[in-house]
Image: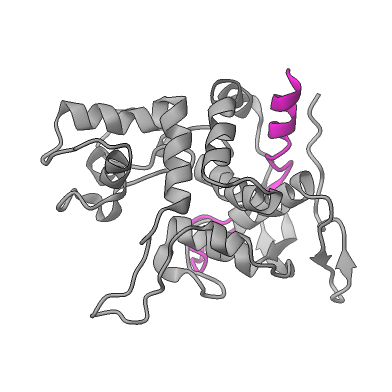
């Protein structure tokens, strides 16, 4: 295993807290250990393009990378797949086949093509392409590339991370937040607050960081950006991964302890050992 791959695999936590459904759902949380097998293969094939995309889209400082990785690992099932739920290209059971693809699971909002104003078509146009409706064989090929091609799986994620108008106010919703590049949230300093959750393995500690939560909402549910906490999918999972990425990628990290004391190491934390 090459050095770069060993370093990247450390970004997958040894243990994660997985909270199925939205943050406010009643689904019980699960304490589990992600495996590295698929992730090692994925990094071997996609790692160079992922690093290139992070540089291109200004994910060029540790805190921005930690915020991105905290989302990408959860969105891809701890880097096990680049199509939502590991579906085949011709599956139509979710969003009529336009389900999530790539490192940030680019998808088509609302499950329909509408007038072409959706995340896939926005990415096609970002590349300078001219997609048409209804989608034909050309558009389906472009769609499938995002979950199979190293450049597009990485490039689509970086583009989505930084592009404008993920959310914007309308005349009917003047309180909807304006959400553009997620880097603006990553750059804001916030406390890693100690929180607990009941899991299948007992009560576990996780850390809530408002700046990271804003990044996560900007990716998963832009209209909830700024809420504390946002009621979105995988907030605890993403936060667990973010805490791990902070330890791996940054020199100094602070986490609040049970008496609000400063800790340099998260509770329940075991650093991933990769040989």
Residue 30's x, y, as percent?
62, 52
What colouring method underlies this structural image?
A: one colour
Q: For the view shown, which residue lies furthest in the top direction? A: 1
Is 68 displayed left or right of 256 in the figure? left
Quadrant assignment, res 52: top right
**At x 29% / y 79%, what residue is drawn?**
173
Quadrant assignment, res 10: top right
| Nearest the eye: 26 or 99 | 99
Is 209 displayed left or right of 158 in the figure? right
- Chain part drawn in magenta: 1-29
User: Which quadrant is the C terminus positioned in?
Assistant: top right
Residue 163's x, y, as percent?
41, 53
Q: Is residue 63 above or below residue 155?
A: below
Q: Is residue 266 visible?
A: yes
**At x 81% / y 33%, what residue is drawn?**
273
Q: Is residue 77 visible?
A: no
Secondary structure mostly seen in magenta is: loop
**At x 56% / y 50%, what residue is drawn?**
71
Residue 151's x, y, as percent?
45, 28
| Nearest the eye: 176 or 184 | 184
Q: For the view shown, which residue lies furthest in the left direction? A: 134
Is 252 displayed left or right of 86 in the figure? right
| Nearest the eye: 89 or 204 | 89
Q: Is residue 99 above or below residue 110?
A: above
Residue 115's x, y, as percent?
14, 52
Is 268 displayed left or right of 93 in the figure? right
């Amino acid at each position: 295993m090459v050095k770069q791959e060993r370093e990247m695999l450390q970004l997958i936590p040894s243990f994660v807290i997985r909270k199925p459904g939205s943050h406010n759902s009643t689904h019980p949380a699960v304490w589990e250990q992600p495996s590295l097998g698929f992730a090692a293969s994925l990094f071997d094939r996609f790692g160079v393009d992922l690093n290139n995309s992070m540089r291109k889209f200004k994910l060029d400082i540790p805190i921005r990378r930690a915020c991105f990785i905290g989302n990408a690992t959860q969105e891809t099932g701890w880097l096990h797949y680049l199509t939502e739920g590991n579906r085949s290209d011709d599956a139509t059971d979710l969003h009529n086949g336009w389900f999530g693809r790539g490192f940030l699971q680019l998808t088509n909002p609302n499950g329909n093509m509408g007038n072409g104003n959706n995340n896939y078509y926005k990415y096609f146009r970002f590349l300078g392409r001219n997609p048409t409706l209804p989608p034909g064989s050309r558009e389906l090929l472009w769609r499938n590339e995002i979950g199979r091609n190293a450049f597009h799986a990485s490039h689509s994620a970086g583009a989505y991370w930084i592009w404008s108008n993920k959310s914007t106010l309308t005349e009917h919703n003047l309180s909807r937040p304006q959400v553009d590049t997620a880097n603006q949230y990553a750059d804001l300093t916030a406390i890693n607050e100690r929180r607990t959750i009941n899991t299948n393995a007992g009560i576990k500690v996780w850390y809530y960081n408002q700046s990271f939560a804003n990044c996560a909402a900007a990716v998963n549910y832009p209209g909830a950006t700024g809420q504390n906490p946002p009621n979105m999918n995988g907030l605890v999972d993403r936060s667990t991964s973010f805490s791990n990425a902070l330890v791996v990628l940054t020199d100094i990290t602070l986490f609040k302890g049970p008496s609000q004391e400063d800790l340099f190491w998260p509770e329940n934390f075991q650093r991933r050992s990769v040989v």
